[in-house]
Image (cartoon, coloured by chain):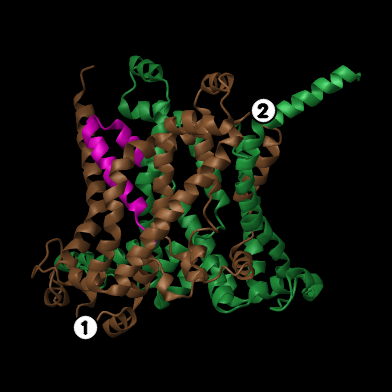
Chain colours: A green, B brown
Amino acid sequence: MDGTQRTIKLRRREQYWRRYWSLYAMLSLPLVYFFIFRYIPMTYIQIAFKNYSIVRSPWEMPWAGNYGFEYFIKAFANRDFLNALRNTLMLNLLDLVMGFPAPIILALILNELPYKRFKRVTQTIAYMPHFLSWVIIAGMALQLLAPTSGLINIWLQKMGVQPIPFLNQPGHWVGTYVVLGIWQSVGWNTIIYLAAITSINPELYEAAAIDGAGRLRRIWHVTLPGIRSTIIVLLILSLGRILGSDFDRPFALRNPLVKDVSDVISIFVYNYGVRGLQFSLTTAVGLFQSVVSVSFLLLADKLAKKFGERGIV
Amino acid sequence: MVKSRESKYLDYILVAICLGVIVVCILPMINLLARSLSSAEYLIRNEVTLWPKGFNIEAYKLVLGDSKYTWAMVWTAIITVAGTFLSLFMTTICAYPLTYDKLKGRKFFSTYILFTMYFSAGTIPMYLLLKDLRLLNHPLVLIVPYCLSVFNMILMRNYLYTIPDSLRESAEIDGASPTKILTSVYLPLSTPVIATLALFYAVGRWNGFSDALMFMNKREYWPIQLLLYNLINAVSSIETYSQEGFTQPGLSETLKAAAIMIATVPILLVYPWLQRYFIQGVTLGAIKE
């Protein structure tokens, strides 16, 4: 490289920095934020393999027994944790099976509605539950579903049906939990499917109509295949969350009568960690949960790609 | 196209289903409203369903007259407004530089940020970090630790991508700096996504209670949802009024209903007006890069 080329290169670099330094200045704040509040906590993960000590930094804490895996062994010997693991899997699976198809069906229905104004009103109202907090939904549910004084049981009794303990008996609680989850999210989750439907080429519908396909056949052969990739992307994300646990929803809906089915991993971590101060054990549980979640996500993504879909990662 | 008779029947069925959805969505609200406006004696006799009986607004007066409750509303409003502005600022300064194709290191920055979406350290490491930073029980703990959401940042970045490059290039030729281009070209064109994210952040902040439950022991800094949680789950009315300072016994059910109604109203007033924005914002932002 001769001298002139070097000066040109240097000048270009100088020009680049003079023009774009402010972009780096802007980005520096978010980068520092992620470093402090997302990456530094990762260094605390080592507590899962060490004996927690309040007076030492995580780097200086002594290693735990069993080659550092003592707290993982303790977790899997802990009845509350095994229970929480089972509940997490059970509730998430039920959510997936019952809750995943619901917004697809509702989106198809909304899309077929011939009255545009009515469609918009339905949408506005169906979005509403998404904006309510789980504390508020739980408060409403407690009043609506109370064994004797709740609206639903008042009506059931009028029809001669025995009152149902929706939130006070484990079996019924699980059903109520799933139904309330669908109630809260079904309307909101239609947005993404409705958007995917609008991008389907209208000529496909015309061609299908010329071929003599009725409305139901057009839904089955044109609309559903048209939103296939959206469905698969959202399915991958749901599978990635199969061991993830939401805190607000089970915590707001639970009560001492149903704790055998309602206490998921996040509630276990809260009870044993934040309240019980068993930091090594709960960090180990959190690490287990994160690792399994990432693995599931990658696995589901690979599977989708194998079937010729685009995937997400 | 003339509709066949079957097609017409299908329309009726669809409309009926949608009416059902509407009823299911608003029934709990109406029931709650009726209970909050009824007198305690009718509630105890299980007579209140969809219309208030023994109409009175005593419960609302009591809740709004309670200084703890009104302070929690005000405090939550403060952290909602402050938190939303901080979040929008952080999201913008994170998303905007990443839309520059020429930015050196862009790939690294994106990976560095996206990684935190897939893998998180968990609750307890966060708790211990906040403890070491002396943020535990500090009012800022309700605003700062979760002020920037990667998901929302991606929504914004994808939206900014849809603004044509030619606008940026012509501004660059005029000698405008990146900051100037952001404030005078990009932000004015980004109303839908800014409105959407403002709604998401504000609703998240107004509805949040788990961070306060875990990181905040001081009752005077409890947001409204945590106060409500304790109110709703107080076993007896005695516990309710001794805990939350309501001085009159016997009203606990109507009080709960009124307290829930009051905390819900701000959201019900805001979201319908932003609907056309958030549909646009979510839809455009969801396009995969």
Q: Which of the chains bears the disc numbered 2?
A: B
Q: Main secondary structure of the magenta part?
A: helix
The residue tagged 2 is: B102
* Picture residue at 22% right of the left edge, 36% below the top: A118
Residue B232 falls in which quadrant of the image?
bottom left
Q: Left or right: where does residue B72 sit relative to residue B95?
A: left
- Amino acid type at mark 2: Lys
Residue B181 visible within the image? yes
- Report the residue that reaches farthest toward the right: A2
Identify whether A105 is placed above or below B143.
Answer: above
Q: Which mark is residue B249?
A: 1
Question: Residue A285: image x %, image y %?
Answer: 63, 67
Q: Position of residue A137 (x, y in %)?
A: 33, 61
- Residue at the image position 29 percent from the left and 31 percent from the top: A112
Q: Amino acid at mark 1?
A: Pro
Task: Note whether A211 is above or below B148 in the view shown.
Answer: above
* Res A163 label: none
Looking at the rendered image, the quarter that the C terminus of chain B falls into is top right
Where's residue A296, x and y in %? Answer: 62, 50
Q: Are marks 1 and 2 in contact (CB under 8 Å)?
A: no
Q: Between marks 1 and 2, how big is the CA–CA gap? A: 67 Å
Identity of the residue drawn at 23% across and 77% down = B252
Does the stretch in magenta take in A112? Answer: yes
* Residue found 73% across the figure and 71% down from its top: A57
- Where residue A292 sits: x, y (%)? 64, 56
Q: Which residues are magenta?
A: A106-134
Tell me the element at label 1.
loop
The answer to whether residue B272 is magenta is no
Secondary structure beneath disc 2? loop
Q: Nearer the viewer, residue A260 or B157?
A: B157
Pick whichever, B5 or B59, lies toward us: B59
